[in-house]
Image (cartoon, rainbow, N blue to C red):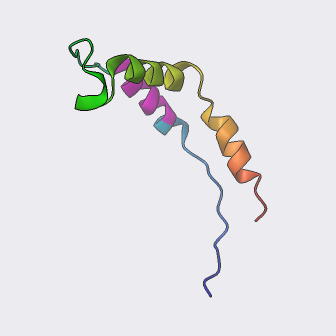
Amino acid sequence: MTELTPFTVDVPPSDLDELQRRLAAARLPDAPYGIGWSHGVERDHLAELVRLWREEFDWRAVEQRLNAWPR
């Protein structure tokens, strides 16, 4: 049986800064109204996901929860 190797999640601040930069620079495509999901993610849904990642998602809190698991 393979043993699990303990690890700690520790994303460098520069990676999170880069993610924020990319999210801020995201250009969402225009799509004809009413086509639904037949051609991919609806623009409004994607815009809300980008907003959540930029304004509400707390990666450091997630890191803490992940790192709290017993080793």
Outermost residue, bottom direction? Answer: 1
| Residue 13: % across, % down | 55, 36
Q: Is residue 69 above or below residue 36?
A: below
Q: Residue at x 22, y 16 (%)?
A: 31
Task: Let me know if residue 20 is in the magenta part.
Answer: yes
Q: Left or right: where does residue 47 sit relative to residue 67?
A: left
Residue at x 27%, y 15% (from the top left corner): 34
Examine the image and state in which quarter residue 40 appears.
top left
Q: Position of residue 53 (x, y in %)?
A: 51, 26
What span is in magenta?
16-25
Q: Which residue is at 41% across, 21% downward?
A: 45
Quadrant location of the C terminus in the rendered image: bottom right
Count numbered badges in the picture.
0
Give coordinates of residue 63: x percent, y percent: 66, 44
The quadrant in which the N terminus is found is bottom right
Q: Is residue 39 left or right of residue 42?
A: left
Instruction: State left or right for residue 59 relative to residue 44.
Output: right
